[in-house]
Image (cartoon, helix red, strand yellow):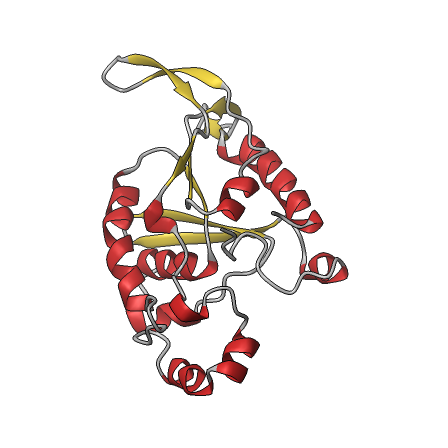
Amino acid sequence: MLSKIGIEYARRLAQYAKEEICHQDVVIDEETGESITKVVPARLWTSTMRRTRETAKFIERPTIRQTWDNGDTIDWVQMRPVARRNLDDLYAGACDGMTYAEIEEKFPEEFERRQKDRLAYRYPRGESYLDVILRLEPLAHEMERTREPLLIIGHQGILRILYAYFMGLSRAEAPYVQIPLGTVVKLSPHTYGCEEKHVCLMDQCEILRNGENGPIAATPTF
């Protein structure tokens, strides 16, 4: 289950989704710069793991009438949650559920192997980053084809890989990408790259004051 601070973050994320993802400013006069706020269809993906699904529970899901470019009109459910197994966290096998400190104490050789090569290291009876990259590849291609704004509530390892893919980083760099806690990382792909923006919903001091020492929505709970 989510902690108290995790629930608070989930509430703030729901508000952000409602105000910033499902609504966008559309310029109606290029000379004056006047704009209106327009409701836009938006998507929501989570992993199948409990913590990411709970983080999405406050997000509103109203039905809107949407007309596509070809003239077809449908009833669209905003932010309808879709749980994707591709987004499940890297499986740690025999080390599942353990902290890095516990792994270092109980499996020092495994800990050392991981430190030397995070990309290729595979947990005993578990996965490596390379394994996860392989299962995320078709999902990344699907994301590229998606026209609507897409909110992904995922795990740190998964988000690192997707971030590296869209920002043009190498596979070797992916395990070391920093995904800040309490923050929405907004990526806007365009012809020549990808624009990045960080939206802080909960600062680090607030997280630490509440005794959190791990990711809010990045550690799987089965």
Residue 170 visible, this orientation: no
Q: How many labels does the image show?
A: 0
Q: Position of residue 94 (x, y in %)?
A: 41, 70
Q: Above or below — where is 200 with respect to 78? A: below
Q: Above or below — where is 120 with respect to 3? A: below
Q: Residue at x 50, y 45 (%)?
A: 50
Q: Which residue is drawn at 72% across and 62% down?
A: 208
Q: Residue at x 45, y 23 (%)?
A: 28
Question: On the picture, is 17 further left or further right than 113?
Answer: right
Q: Position of residue 98 (x, y in %)?
A: 52, 69
Q: Position of residue 6 (x, y in %)?
A: 64, 49
> Is 169 in front, or is 76?
76
Q: Above or below — where is 31 with respect to 12? A: above
Q: Residue at x 47, y 59 (%)?
A: 156
> Is 148 in front, or is 123?
123
> Is 53 in front, or is 11?
53
Q: Position of residue 145 (x, y in %)?
A: 25, 39
